[in-house]
Image (cartoon, rainbow, N blue to C red):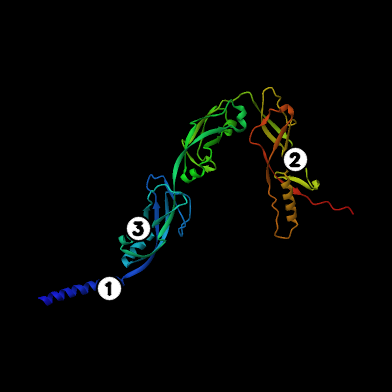
Amino acid sequence: MKSRAQLILATCGLTVLIWIYADLISQEAYEATLSVKLSVPTASEAVIQVAGAPGASEGGWETTVTVPVTTNLVGSKGAIAEIEHLKRTNALVIEVTVTDTEPQPADVLKRIDIRQRVSEWARKNSLRVFDLSPSFIDLKEDRYVSIDLAVEASAGVFADKLQGPPRVEPAKVRARLLASERDRLAPADRKLQISIEEQLRTGSQEAFTVSLAGRRWQGLEVTCVPDQVRVTVQRRHDLITHRITSVPLYELWPAYRPDQGLFHIDYEDGESPLQHIEVAVPPGTRLPTNTDVVAYVKVEPDDLKQASQDKAAETAPAGSAGTRTAIPREVKFIFSQEFEGVTVISPTPIVRLRIVQADAPAAAP
């Protein structure tokens, strides 16, 4: 009886060894690229950015970032076949929630150890991990905060057409921005200035709505709540808008102009363009004509230097080339003393021109 029990135990042990050996010889190695998806908790104000992970670009601040991780796995043929199926369906994804910790400076790195999460994922799929790269992911962390900004409306060139400054409602808005940007701009004046020139130029209303979408504060685009304000103005109705056409355009050259006969202006559209402007005329003032105003463009000394460089490049060996780029230049206007209160209504005309140096005349024989 004893020998029979020993025989049964020996048979069972041999069977287990055979199963283990069969399992070992059926194991295969497999390399898979997993997508590790790191996210901040829902409704969190935190945002993250990958820092230096292989294969991952350092983009903007996001609530979710994905990093590719190369993983060397070992498992049965059946388990690996299942991984192949997941790969074809783009389902090789491991989701990791980034703990929302106390605020840290945006340049302080937070290291996420993903080894345990990848190992847990592998075990659920009857696989073992013997290598992965990277095994850590470094993140930068920031968070959105809100600050109060006072809103001021600028009438620009129409300021003298208003009785008093524009009134803005609400006078303050909440601006949403990153904590790091708030700290960087801490000394800045917390005022958001908006231009209402276009509304004053194109309409006669004394109250209108201005959108704050896409507005910039200290060069930084911010999201405002509310996203629009109502501006109320009180216009002065004693100024007359008048159009002056066909004003000749003159050229103001530097006092020092070497070889002045060799320099001239080429306008992008050909000949010197006639100017047409809108002006605001005080009551009681005669409406000016094109003979009462002088329009001119100013040539700077650096323009002459550039023209000389362009000329030199024309005669340089092959491969050299002058810039010959058109220069945008604002047209200036001067009214005679009789029209001291007349102002040009924005926008000021712009012309595009090139300063050209001509060939020097041949010496007399």
Which residue lies most toward the top here? 284
Badge 3 vs badge 1, beta-carbon distance below 8 Å: no
Q: Which amino acid, by three-letter code, is at mark 3?
A: Arg
Quadrant of the image containing the N terminus: bottom left
Badge 2 vs badge 1, beta-carbon distance below 8 Å: no
Q: Which residue is mark 1?
A: 21
Mark 3 falls on what kind of element? helix
Q: Of label 3 and label 1, which has the lower sequence position?
A: 1
- Depicted 96 relative to depicted 212: above or below: below
Badge 2 vs badge 3, beta-carbon distance below 8 Å: no
Q: Is residue 156 left or right of residue 271?
A: left
The residue nearer to you, when weighing 289 against 329, is 329
Residue 155: give x, y in percent of width and height: 58, 32
Rounded to the nearest whole Å, what is the CA distance between mark 3 and mark 1?
Answer: 29 Å
Q: Is residue 274 left or right of residue 57?
A: right
Which image quarter: residue 289? top right
- Give the residue drawn at x 64%, y 25%: 239
Which residue lies most toward the right here? 365
Residue 6: give x, y in percent of width and height: 15, 75
Rounded to the nearest whole Å, what is the CA distance between mark 2 and mark 1?
Answer: 96 Å
Q: Which residue is mark 2?
A: 251
Question: How many C-alpha atoms fall within 10 Å of the one at disc 1: few (<14), some, or many (≥20)?
Answer: few
The residue nearer to you, when weighing 103 against 296, is 103
Mark 2 falls on what kind of element? strand
Residue 112: give x, y in percent of width and height: 39, 56
- Depicted 95 relative to depicted 229: above or below: below
Residue 315: give x, y in percent of width and height: 75, 57
- Give the residue drawn at x 75%, y 55%: 312
Q: Which amino acid, by three-letter code, is at mark 2?
A: Glu
Q: Of label 2 and label 3, which has the lower sequence position?
A: 3
Q: Which residue is mark 3?
A: 117
Q: Which amino acid, by three-letter code, is at mark 1?
A: Tyr
